[in-house]
Amino acid sequence: MGSTTKRLAVLGSTGSIGTQTLDIVRTFPDEFSVVGLAARKSRSLLERQIQEFRPEMAYCEGSDDEKAFLNEYGCADCEIAEIAASPDVDIVVAATTGDVAIPATFAGIEAGKDIALANKETVVVAGELVTQAACERNVSLLPLDSEPNAIWQCLRGEDRAVSKLIITASGGAFRETPIELLPDVTIEQALRHPTWQMGAKITVDSATMMNKAFEVIEAHWLFGVSWDDIEVVIHPQSMIHSMVEFVDGSVKAQISPPDMRLPIQYALFYPRRLNNPSIKSFDPIATGALSFEPLDLERYPCFDLALEVARRGGTWPAALCGADDAAVDLFLEGKIGFMEIPVVISEALREHRNVEKPALQDALDAASTARQRAAGIVEV
């Protein structure tokens, strides 16, 4: 193992981003060492990952008996924050969903670890706090999601004379569904994303375009661009992952076939670029025409709702995040219809009491309260 080996802690190792991160480690075994893995309930997959990568530390939910396998492999049973802040970790890969690992991400930042960030909720719930903390600790926030990662790549080598960010969106599962049919779409239909294979929560957020609103919030905080200078367009082919327009009118785009391993690899190796034979290259002839469409706000009411709430600042974005979390759960449980998701979110936010200059706990409390309020709207 070379002296430049990067030591990784992967939070959310059994999810989509976590497993693809470990794919990159397999491709470049001499470049990385996995020293920490954390999952919630996917214990069988976590056990297989521990067998393969032999981390020093691991976390999963469950009773002592359910977690006994950790010790069988000589793996210390640790809390997520303990893993993130460990002196044996160089980069924390924050690949969880929801806000469960936000305190651990902050613990990693406080300990001086670079954060490879795939967890949108961290920036939505605590955008100002996390960017300020990273700046104070001289820590890099390395975006893993394809859209902020694409913006990051387009900004590389530039002097930040940005006129506009253009974030692309596939349009989700219902881009072409007649609007009048949306109230009756099924859970199974909502989970059929036309381009990406993702977890249930983020796939539904893609269908409502809440996911894209979260990416606008991410871009606002990660790149310091004003709300009015961030545009979203529908791009069905999902080949252009975002664009940056500069003040002279030039536009840079990051183009590649949809494969999350590419942005993950870019972040983990930054500033180096390495060839990965398993990642397909862009073929303009085979791809054919690339098209763009305006975002239809009637089709995606969550988008405007989310950005109107986010612009208020304080703990409003955190409450939005918690309310959306619960509303999507209600839909996936069959308790509300697809077009009731924004209704539940709006109702849950009615009683929100904003904190203008929140501490992290204020933001987490706001998310939790809104989540509980939204979950309680529908009687079980």
Image (tube, rainbow, N blue to C red):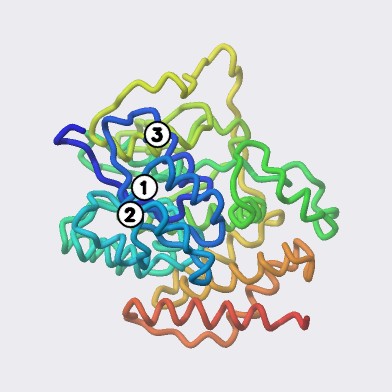
Examine the rendered structure and indicate whether residue 106 appears above or below residue 3.
below
- Residue identifier under label 3: 24
- Residue identifier under label 2: 222
- The residue closer to the viewer here, 288 or 27, is 27
Instruction: Please state, as top left, top right, bottom left or bottom right, where the C terminus lies in the image.
Output: bottom right
Q: Position of residue 43 (x, y in %)?
A: 54, 56
Q: Position of residue 311 (x, y in %)?
A: 44, 68
- The residue closer to the viewer here, 377 or 299, is 377
Q: Are marks 3 and 1 in contact (CB under 8 Å)?
A: no
Instruction: Please state, as top left, top right, bottom left or bottom right, where the N terminus lies in the image.
Output: top left
Q: Assess disc 1: are there few (<14), some (14-19) or many (≥20) residues with their C-alpha within 10 Å of its C-alpha.
A: many
The span from disc 3 to disc 2 (Cα, nearest Å) is: 24 Å
For the question of whether residue 137 can be seen, the reply is yes
- Disc 3 marks which amino acid? Ile
Q: Secondary structure at mark 1?
A: strand
- Disc 1 marks which amino acid? Pro
- Residue identifier under label 1: 143
The span from disc 1 to disc 2 (Cα, nearest Å) is: 9 Å
Q: Position of residue 11 (x, y in %)?
A: 41, 55
Tell which circle, 3 or 1, labels the residue nearer the N-terminal end.
Answer: 3
